[in-house]
Image (spheres, rainbow, N blue to C red):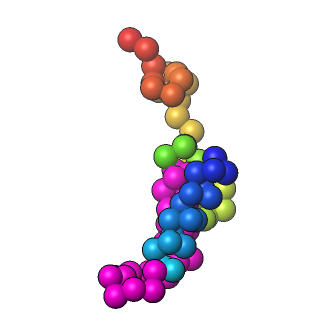
Amino acid sequence: MALHIWSMSHGVASLFARGDAARRKLPMSPEELLEAEVLIYLRGLGFTTDRRPASAAEPPPLPDDDKPAGPWGRSK
């Protein structure tokens, strides 16, 4: 995980460090771009990335018969 985040950081630094005329204007700062990348990465791994307090971010509990079993849901 650390290597993935390091490589994302390196990519952002490379984008913003270019000093030639080919460098395009980017719509966000390096910090905002890296934060967005890391949040998308963490969501892909299944982490909650909502910034609200944990009690507000959690959905209401499901009844026992509606709970999925395992990462792909209940087997049929």
Q: Nearer the viewer, residue 7 or 50?
A: 7
- On the rendered image, what quadrant is the C terminus found in? top left
Q: Nearer the viewer, residue 42 or 7?
A: 7
- Asked which quadrant contains residue 60, the reply is top right
Q: Is residue 21 depicted above or below 70 in this figure? A: below
Does residue 33 belong to the magenta stretch? Answer: yes
Q: Can residue 57 be seen in this view?
A: no
Q: Which of 4 and 72 is in front in this view?
A: 4
Q: Nearer the viewer, residue 24 or 74?
A: 24
Q: Is residue 13 visible?
A: yes
Q: Is residue 66 depicted above or below 47 in this figure? A: above
Residue with the most extreme top position: 76
- Count all numbered tags in the image, as a single digit: 0
Does residue 39 belong to the magenta stretch? Answer: yes
Q: Where is residue 71 in the image (x, y as percent from the top left)?
A: 51, 28
Residue with the most extreme front position: 20
Q: Where is residue 65 in the image (x, y as percent from the top left)?
A: 50, 22
Q: Give the range drawn in magenta.
A: 18-43
- Asked which quadrant contains residue 38, the reply is bottom right
Q: Position of residue 39 (x, y in %)?
A: 54, 59
**Residue under the point 66% across and 56% down:** 54
**Residue under the point 54% across and 43% down:** 45
**Residue under the point 53% across and 23% down:** 70
Q: Is residue 51 depicted above or below 66 in this figure? A: below
Side of 56 where 23 appears, left or right: left
Q: Where is residue 33 in the image (x, y as percent from the top left)?
A: 49, 72
**Residue under the point 54% across and 60% down:** 8
Q: Is residue 22 depicted above or below 2 in this figure? A: below
